[in-house]
Amino acid sequence: MANPLKCDLCSKPATVHLTQIVNNKVHKIDLCEACAQAKGVTDPSGFSLADLLLKASLNPEAATTGVRCEQCGFTQTDFKKHGRFGCPACYETFKGILEPMLDNMHKGTVHTGKVPQRALERKSLYDRLTKLEVDLSDAIKSERYEDAARCRDEINQVKQSVATKPSR
């Protein structure tokens, strides 16, 4: 049987194992339960996004820039202390700190959200109907009656498919 890992601080058996990757280098820390609690590692409120964003090891230039929001006067220290920004303008002011961190944490820095499939289908049908009605109007104005009849028939088909779809 392998020897259990020892706490990096007091050499008791380690039960908490932390791994941090900074600049593509892996740093591992093994702590016993007592040392982990003393350092606030096991406290769920002990780690916040603000702490991660402002750690000098993750973004060395961020801790020394002294950036201040022009709207509310919030500084990086205020952000770390409160765990949230002071106003909407802070997001733009601290953009240089936020974007790299959010880009690493998520698939990008812009929230696009999700659209339910049925809503997409309804929008697609609505857009198709709108285009057909415009085409019908143009065909009538320019006296292209065969095109107008085709558009009218397609409009009726789309409306018929909407009427026969089951509602959920």
Image: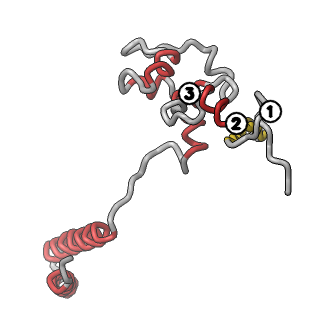
Query: Label 1 belongs to which residue?
Result: 11
Image coords of residue 165 (percent x, y): 20, 83
Quarter of the picture holding the C terminus:
bottom left
Q: Is 73 placed above or below 124 here?
A: above
* Distance from the alpha carbon under mark 2 to that under mark 3: 22 Å
Q: Is 155 placed above or below 134 here?
A: below
Mark closer to the chain start, 1 or 3: 1
Q: Of circles 2 and 3, which is in front?
A: 2
Name the residue: 39% across, 53% down. 113
Name the residue: 54% across, 32% down. 47
Quarter of the picture holding the N terminus:
bottom right
Q: Nearer the viewer, residue 1 or 5?
A: 1
Q: Is residue 109 left or right of residue 151?
A: right
Quadrant position of residue 119: bottom left
Residue, far right: 2
Quadrant position of residue 124: bottom left
* Distance from the alpha carbon under mark 1 to that under mark 2: 8 Å
Image coords of residue 61 (percent x, y): 66, 20
* Distance from the alpha carbon under mark 1 to that under mark 3: 27 Å
Q: Is residue 68 left or right of residue 20?
A: left
Task: Label 3, secondary structure: give it.
Answer: helix
| Amino acid carrying mark 2 in the image | Cys
Query: Label 2 belongs to which residue?
Result: 32
Q: Is 150 placed above or below 57 here?
A: below
Q: Nearer the viewer, residue 138 or 21?
A: 21
Image coords of residue 150 (percent x, y): 21, 86
Query: Label 3 belongs to which residue?
Result: 51
| Amino acid carrying mark 3 in the image | Asp
Task: Label 2, secondary structure: give it.
Answer: loop
| Label 1 with label 2: CB-CB less than 8 Å | no
Task: Label 1, secondary structure: give it.
Answer: loop
